Image (spheres, helix red, strand yellow):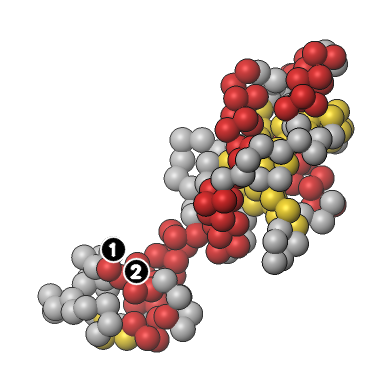
Amino acid sequence: MPHERRTETSLYEPVKRYLEALGFTVKGEVCGCDLVALRGDERPIVVIGELKLSFSLDLVLQAVDRTTACDEVWLAVGPRGHKRLCDPRVRKLCRFLGFGLLGVSSTGSVEVVVEPSPWKPRQDRRRRTRLIDEHRKRIGDPARGGSTRQPIMTAYRQQVLACAASLADGPRRTSELRSVLPNAPIILLRKLPLFSSATGTAGSPESSVGSMS
């Protein structure tokens, strides 16, 4: 039987389970991050996770780029990279940068190699807010962390599809759509040709909305 080729997505579920056990809500592929985890409501703790089959400079550089948008960064490395995780220099580097480091085995067990330290750079509030908004607006967890070369189902795309579904049975007013889709006016302005009237009269987003053409 041929050996199954592992990808970064194989690390997602074990790391997600680990963070959920710590009380986080985890979603994959949020604003370019392999995973984002939130805990708390009013001012949530924000954790960004990056998944790689082996430990590399690219992984570290990716993590450095994430630091201003979150409270903690966790690096998760697959079985292929476990030899590097035993290197004391790797552990020292993660401690120096304040990153958490996880080792994921071939059976899906997760080992904490390095706990994240309290060192914190200056935060990018706009980027942090964007992460929280996208995480909270996204319905369910439609994208597996570590996915590449395929479209990501963002919260905006979910709302566009919901708007299209609402118009499938005929015209509706924007006020009706707004009750279930707060961003309906914005979506209609951007996607006006898609939601144009079958009669050719689209109207404005504040007027009655035509059926799907």
Bin the neighbour count of mark 1 within 10 Å (Cα to Cα): few under 14, some 14-19, many 20 and up.
few
Residue at mark 1: 190
143 vs 97, left or right, is: left
Which of the pair 96/184 is nearer the observer?
A: 96
**Count of labels in the image:** 2
- Depicted 152 relative to depicted 196: above or below: above
- Secondary element at tag 2: helix
Q: CA distance from mark 2 to mark 1?
A: 6 Å
Q: Quadrant of residue 110?
A: top right
Amino acid type at mark 1 = Arg
Q: Quadrant of residue 2?
A: top right
Q: Are marks 2 and 1 in contact (CB under 8 Å)?
A: yes
In the rendered image, the quadrant that contains the N terminus is top right
> Residue at image x 56%, y 45%?
124
x and y, in percent, of residue 125 in the image: 57, 51
In the rendered image, the quadrant that contains the C terminus is bottom left
Residue at mark 2: 186
Which of the pair 102/66 is nearer the observer?
A: 66
